Amino acid sequence: MDKVSIPVSCCEVGEILAEDVLNEWGIILVSQNTIINQYIKNKLIEMRIPNILVYMPVSLQSYSDGDMKYNEVKKNYVEVVMSVKGILNELAAGGKVGYEKIFTVSQLIYSSVNESTSLIKCLAEMRNIDEYTYTHSVNVAFYSMLIAKWLNLPEFKIHEAIQAGLLHDIGKVKISDEILNKKGKLTSEEYEVMKKHSIYGYDLIKNMSEFSDHIKNGVLMHHERMDGSGYPYGISGVSIWLYAKIISVSDIYDAMTHDRVYKKKATPFEVFQMFLTTGMCTLDTLVLKTFLNKLPAYFVGTTVELNNGETGEIVYVPPHDIASPVVRVAKKYYDLSSINELKIFSMI
Ligand SMILES: [Fe+2]
Ligand SMILES: [Fe+2]
């Protein structure tokens, strides 16, 4: 998309930032891809930012394209979930992992690679179209694609990250339904069985020459942690392969933002808070920082319910405090970083 530099005073609400806006000390004030609203425009004027780089103003034609793109992304997502359901059911019935099918699904996923805005909206909305197992594998593949793209990996590696994401939990087909769908906490014995799914998944693909060692180790190591606290081997740091580090972030983010039988879902901002604290020790810093630098800005414009019962719209996510956005309720602005007791209760 073409970019153009314009004075802040001339920018229109709805235009999209084509690069981060920095202050004089190089600290990011507003992240790339944020949709400019009145609050952000006023802040930039207040902070005396002279010019900003935005994507070329969208014409009426591309507005309708935008709507169409969201619907296309949604249709594509549903198609991917259905295909993955077929693949996993076949596998559970004793079939083999079919490379062709995985390749076709990964191509379908990759077709949304340049539609981050529609895609993130779609991933946040399409929560309950099918059972968790299917949607989870698909969501992890989509988030892994976005992270690989944001890391500026070459196209073939983005495809590999998608495939590793799709396959990461296939070992769960070897775990009994009793353990897999247990309503309530697993006993320590059951948890030990569950932990074997990484090795089972690796075993299912280890002899397939179509998948690279990077993909295979992504599946095997996706529960390993940087400080050695993960499983199955408890390895740490550089011993963990890249796709496993990418999947770890996607996996935790998707699992925490999904309702489960034993746990209510967290908001993205609660997950960001966890990532900024414990996540910094257990997850790869570069992968995590890349995710946290990019994703939060996409929530500007989202409607949320606050824990005081009011409903409002996220108007700004401060890059230096991504867990505490600014929310507009009618004519009031709540800066959640300065009002301790006020929190986002749910995303609408
Ligand atoms: Fe897993
Ligand atoms: Fe998973």
Image (cartoon, grey):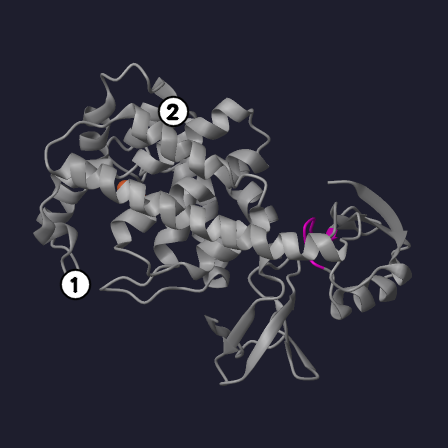
**Residue 106 placement: quadrant:** top left
Residue lying at 54% horizontally and 39% vertically, measured from the top left: 113
Seen in the picture, residue 205 relative to 173 is either above or below; the reply is above
Residue lying at 33% horizontally and 30% vertically, measured from the top left: 102
User: In the visual, does 250 lie left or right of 40?
Assistant: left
| Amino acid type for the residue under numbered disc 2 | Ser
Mark 2 is surrounded, within 10 Å at the Cα level, by few (under 14), some (14 to 19) or many (20 or more) other residues, namely few
- The secondary structure type at the circle numbered 1 is loop
Dot 2 corresponds to which residue? 239
**Residue 125 placement: quadrant:** bottom left
Where is residue 25 shown, x and y percent of the image?
Answer: 81, 48
Q: Quadrant of the N terminus?
A: top right
Tell me: is circle 2 under 8 Å from ligand 1. Answer: no
- Answer with mark 1 or mark 2, whichever residue precedes in sequence: 1
User: In the visual, does 10 lie left or right of 28?
Assistant: right
Which range of residues does the magenta coloring cover? Answer: 28-35
- The secondary structure type at the circle numbered 2 is helix
Is residue 30 shown in magenta? Answer: yes
Quick one: 257 or 65, which is closer to the camera? Answer: 65
